[in-house]
Image (spheres, grey):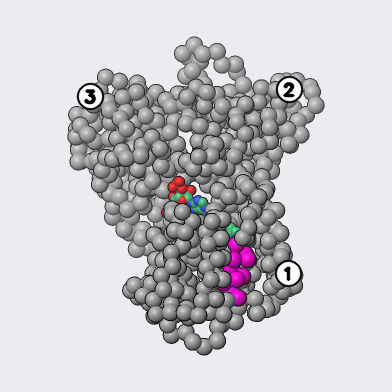
Amino acid sequence: MTTDLIRRRDIDQIALLTLANPPVNALGRAVRQKLAALASELEADDSVRAVVLTGEGRVFVGGADIGEFDRPPEEPHLPDVIAAIEAARKPWVAALNGAALGGGAELALGCHYRIFAKEARLGLPETALGLIPGAGGTQRLPRRIGLAPAIEVITAGRTLSANEAQDAGLADRIAAGDLIAEAQAFARTLDGPLPQPAGAASLADPGPAFWEEARARIAKAARGNPAPVAALEAIHVGVAEGFAAGLRAERETFLRLRGSDEAAALRHLFFAERAAVRPAALRGIEPAPMARIGVIGGGTMGSGIAAAIAAAGLEVTLAETGSDALEAGLTRVRAIFEAQVTRGLTDRAGAADRLARVSGTVGLGPLAVCDLVIEAVFEDLAVKRRVFEDLTRLCRPDAILATNTSYLDPERIVAGLPNPDRFIALHFFSPAQVMKLLEIVPLAATTSRTLATGFALAARLGKIPVQAGNGEGFIGNRILKRYRAEAEALLFAGASPAEVDQAMRAFGFGMGPFEMQDMAGLDIAFRAREAARAQGQDLPEGPGDRLVRAGRLGRKSGGGWYDYAPESRQPHPSAEVAALIAPLVTPRPRPSAMEIAERLIGAMAEEGQRICDEGLAQGPADIDLVEVHGYGFPRHKGGPMFHTARKGPTRAGGPACPGPTNADPRKGGAAPT
Ligand code: 3H9
């Protein structure tokens, strides 16, 4: 009921308003209506001297209701509600019990005073949704904390802790104990004139060079998302033309971006990511404990998985076959933590704590005490099978045993072994301490408890879990195979590797398919094709095969799809490759950059649709999550399924997936694609 969305309780002439709109006290229409009504009611109520505004639960206000952004804006608009509060003759004190984000931060900025709980924080993450703050954030924040810090908070979506907010002059105090009691006591002391509103301050214009440098730097970091630069422009208007003009520019830009493809794509991912973390089918199912985890194999993958586990605060034992291999694995783990210190992801003490949670063992014996063991050894059926035979003898019958295989059939790895209910495939992506994606593949006998443990591990490690059926390449590598085949087909149509790569960079990928193959090495996929041929599969000889046979394995051999000067990562178009491809080209109009990108994305979407039709993915949104979090698909394009459905099929046979919508499927809307 709307009357419950904000509770009012008056004590000693101080009105306490508690926003109670779970899960995050979002400022949906009914909340805005209620807040606007309360603002005028309180203004007229002579029994009230001051107002304390807080939120129920762990969040102050998580922002505007993102679910409303697919509909036209509805009155009362948030900027007007905030303006009414700011213009009140009585002091409003925001008591920040938790995160104040987006519209929540703007609401707090519109109040006359702000008191932070220790764990409270304030941020404007709108650009991550393809938007800019739309209720005064681009104008009030710079006037409160200064231009340069505000530009960083807004365009990079950085969140300020309570201490940082206090240092920046945003927090009037940080509560030492009971936030509400302290805020009420603070409100009782207020009887002088109200502080000047943010809009009364003007900002010195640092001049054109400042804005040009900022624009270039922010555009580069945004990688195709137009929102951060648009936020900068709104701030600029406010500096150059004043507060009122800045607010008008902000509102206009916010409304324009709200309807953009990029914002729709980012909202789609927002809801898809949250749906992926808590699958409805596993609600109420208790996962196995994860007090101690074992990882077998100290190579790049195993050491990355061990580092990710330790970084999440869990104990991990890394097992190898010999002491040299173990030492090499532990050295890799140490190097990962050192790199994290260099990049500011943790400090020295944090890295030492992480390392202290990693132990090593030669042989599998000490893994007997583990609740969960993840195997990441050489991609060879017999080797992996032996590991699982040993583990089933060694571990408790209820310990969860996972394989990290990419291409082998996990059923064959564990066939006939006892207690098959606890086997599962957990497919990490390299580097595992960085990549967000975790494909979770239940086998025929896997129970819900085992599956729930995979999801619980993902949540603990901060990964995005996607459940995949047990088909070759699961979801991601199957689409990758198709993507690469289409990229080669484009060569036959007359495009050069450089043109294909350039088109995909322009689309928003960090790297094109040929550069990527050169970096990873062409020989791995070649060996897989040769193995398939040996088993009788009819795979025609492609240009990739010819390159490997000519000794061009990628960067590591000095040449692949490109030439590389010794010690250089810089690719140069290769005459040898051009000569090799030339006889295969069928003369026809060469594809444009846009056609190249659309063909490659279309191929991904087609394969994704097939995977859905075969029941190997839970839905198109999961295909998008795999591509965005595992393969560098640009976030602001939403993933191949979202992009293709929004643009419509571009060629005959394009995927027939339902049109995308951002309605949250769990709230009665259609599925988000
Ligand atoms: C904005 O404010 C624009 C304004 O500038 C201008 C307006 C004019 N709306 O993340 P969680 C749902 S743009 C609707 O797992 P946590 C979420 O889908 C907004 N729903 O929780 C999930 O639903 P379910 C700027 C929202 O405790 C549930 O809440 N704000 C919203 O780990 C729990 O979410 C942001 O970008 C929302 N705003 O983290 C902040 N937020 O339970 C976005 C969440 O059905 N939100 N939901 O799966 C967050 O960052 C986190 O949710 C937060 C809590 C840190 C608040």
**656 within the magenta span:** no
> Is there a contact, CB below 8 Å, between mark 2 and mark 1?
no
Where does label 1 land, which residue? 245
The answer to whether residue 311 is seen in the rendering is yes
* Gap in angstroms between the C-alphas marked 2 and 3: 54 Å
> Which secondary structure lies at badge 3?
loop
In the shown orientation, is residue 552 left or right of residue 324?
right
Residue, x 52% and y 27% (percent of image)? 612
Q: x%, y% of residue 411?
A: 35, 22
Q: Is residue 454 above or below residue 62?
A: above
Q: Nearer the viewer, mark 3 or mark 1?
A: 1
Which badge, 3 or 1, comes first in the chain's sequence? 1
Where does label 3 land, which residue? 418
Q: What is the crowding at mark 3: few (fewer than 14 residues within 10 Å), some, or many (at least 20)? A: few
Quadrant of the image containing the C terminus: top right
Residue, x 31% and y 38% (percent of image)? 285
Q: Nearer the viewer, residue 410 or 488?
A: 410
Of all residues shown, which one is farthest toward the bottom? 192
Q: x%, y% of residue 421?
A: 27, 28
Magenta segment boundaries in residue numbering: 78-87
Residue 519 lies in quadrant: top right
> Which secondary structure lies at badge 2?
loop
Amino acid, disc 1 = Ala
Amino acid, disc 3 = Pro
Q: Nearer the viewer, residue 534 or 262?
A: 262
Residue 59 lies in quadrant: bottom left
Where does label 2 land, which residue? 585
Which badge, 2 or 3, comes first in the chain's sequence? 3
The yes-or-no answer for disc 2 within 8 Å of ligand 1 is no
Of all residues shown, which one is farthest toward the top? 536
Q: Is residue 288 above or below residue 55?
A: above
